[in-house]
Structure formats: C-alpha cells, structure tokens
Amino acid sequence: MKNRTLLKYHSIFGILGGAFLLVLGITGSILIFNENIDSAIFKKYEVEKTGSARNIDKAVETIQKHYPNWDTRLIKFKAGQTLIFNLRSPEARKYVFVHPDSGDIIKEIDANSHITKWILKLHYSLHAGVVGRFLILFAGIAFLFSIITGTILYRKVFWKTLLFKTKLKWDNKKNRYSGLHRYVGVWALFLNSIIVVSGVFLAYKVASAGLKPASKAVTPIINTSTELLLTKAQHEYPDFTPTYVRLPTSEKSNMVLYGIFKNDPFYYSEFYNKLEADINTGQIVKATKISEASVGTKLESMITPLHFGQYGGWPIKFLYALIGLSGPFLSVTGFIIWLKRK
C-alpha cells in the first residue's frame, strides 16, 4: 500500500475518532487517580480512631434493614475505619458510610453524581446510554486503526524518531505540527497500544451489557456472620487477602469474597479470585483462583489493570496519565495537519 493511501486512511480514522478521543484521553487520565480522589473526598466521613473495632455483622444488618433488595457490596472494611458499602439497583447507585463499631449510618451519597463515577460514566458512555456506549466502542476501534496505519506509515523513520535522530522542522505550521505529531505518536505507541486494545475490549463488554435488561436484586437476609467468614477465609486460605465482599442477590446465590492470592502476578484483577460461602452455614463452598484458570480467563483478568494502570504506584500512574493526554494531543495536531494539507 502506498504512503499516500496509508495517509488517507490514517487521517480518516483519526478524524472519526478524534472528537471522542479528546474526551476519552482527558477523562482517562483523571480516572488513573480515581482511588486517590475518592480517598480524599471520603476522608470527611471517616470516624475518629476506634482502635481495632470492627462490627461488620451489625453494619450488614443495618444496611439490609434500610436498603432491602439492593445489590450490596462492602468495598472497604479495614478495622477501626469507616465501613463503605456500594449499593446498586437498576435505577440508582449509592455509597453508604457506616460506623465500624456501632453499625450506624454516617452518610449516604448518590454514587452517580459522585465526581469519579460521573467521569467514569462520561468515559464509557458519554452519559448517552446505550448509544453512547457504542459510540465509544466505535471511537476505540477507529483509534486502533489509526495507530496501525500510523505505525506502518512511519515505519521507515520509527527508530530514528525514537532515538531523536530526525530533526523537527519549525519553518511552517504544517511541518511543526507534523514533527510533533510523529514524535508523540512514536514515543507513546507502546503504552497507547495497550490502552487502546484493552479499551476496545472493555468497551465491547460495556456495550454488550447495555443491551441486556437490568435485573433487580432480591437480597436474602444473611443468617451467618460475615466477620466469622472473613476469619474462616484467613484460616483456610492464609495466602488470600479479601478486598471486596458481595452479598447474595438471590436466595440461591452465595456470599462472595473477592481478593488477591499471595503469589498472583501484579497485573491480575482482584475480581477473578473468589471464595463463595453459604449464607446459612457460613461454610466456604467454592474457591476460584485465577492461577488455575484458562489462558483466556487470565488474559481477560489483565484487561482492566492494564487499561487503568492499576498495577503500579505513583510513577506508573503519572506515566499513564501523560500517555492518556497524548491521545487528545495527537487528535488536535492530526486535525491541524489535515486542514493544512487541504
């Protein structure tokens, strides 16, 4: 394929996905720090130090009394700190903060209006429902093809650009933006490819889920101790660290502890390890380990951590945020180059 034809397709894919890329890049760079943002906002609902006190059973009882038939997840349960529940229904989502000792509700907030959740929804659906989800999927595919055509187009100068052996020309705007576009595109290529491929996969799952009708949970009353279940899990699986508790959503489902096994690679998602317990006996009836899963499942478990940079500390987060902003930069410079060429 001739370079002129490649450039034509590269421009088309860039223009098709460009407007969406501005939103995706900026929101994605913010979402890299979503846990840090949430921690800072939720700090005002934190109780004064209560030692090692933690009464999850009383908190679960309170939640089930005040919020029957909500899909209930306990997302923070560190001893001596405020317990945080994430509640979901087909129409709404809530964060509920509960005192770790008394089990009293401290605060309830609308999760859909919470800043990080609002940005996340903008990121994956543009707040436009199912149509927005498919537009994001379309934009991701367009950006992926833009990366592929751009890589082929600049293949002869790739290594020279990577090693700063090609000079930037500042004599006119077209050459100036073209040089910057090439340098940023080449230097961000590897991580952008990971973000885009994983993003297309996630967008497909989100778009597909949007076609299915939402079901309302019918949450049974828990007849066993969640606190004892956590103790039992620690005893029976000492290499397992629970990070997330999901209450059953029907009479036939189990309580589930999600978490991390000690020897798991850092790039696996915590939601692919789980211990399931009977809500009447408290016995652990099933253990699922990502280390024992199929290759396909292992690859799937890597998608979210790789897309949002959840596998590293601050250096990785800042790198992801910087690369995330490269998308909007490439979109704007690419559009300017296209206009100058026209």
Image (cartoon, rainbow, N blue to C red):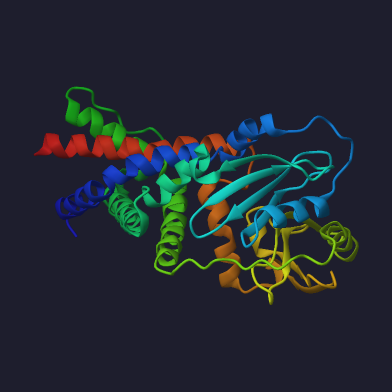
Q: Is residue 168 visible?
A: yes
Which residue in the rendered view is the most extreme toward the left? Answer: 342
Image location of residue 306, percent across then percent down: 54, 52
The residue shown at (38%, 44%) is 24
Left/right of residue 171 with respect to residue 214 in the rendered view:
left
Left/right of residue 165 with respect to residue 215 in the rendered view:
left
The residue shown at (61%, 40%) is 35
Q: Is the C terminus in the top left, top right, bottom left or bottom right quadrant?
A: top left
In this rendering, is residue 240 above or below 96?
A: below
Number of numbered tags placed on the structure image: 0
Q: Is the N terminus in the top left, top right, bottom left or bottom right quadrant?
A: bottom left
The residue shown at (68%, 73%) is 253
**Nearest the camera: 60 or 11?**
60
Left/right of residue 145 with respect to residue 79 in the rendered view:
left
Q: Is residue 160 visible?
A: no
Image location of residue 189, percent across then percent down: 41, 46
Image location of residue 178, percent across then percent down: 24, 35
Image location of residue 296, percent across then percent down: 56, 71
In this rendering, is residue 134 above or below 147?
A: below
The residue shown at (44%, 48%) is 121
Left/right of residue 85 with respect to residue 333 in the rendered view:
right
Quarter assignment of residue 168: top left
Which residue in the rendered view is the most extreme toward the front? Answer: 65
**Nearest the camera: 318 or 234?**
234
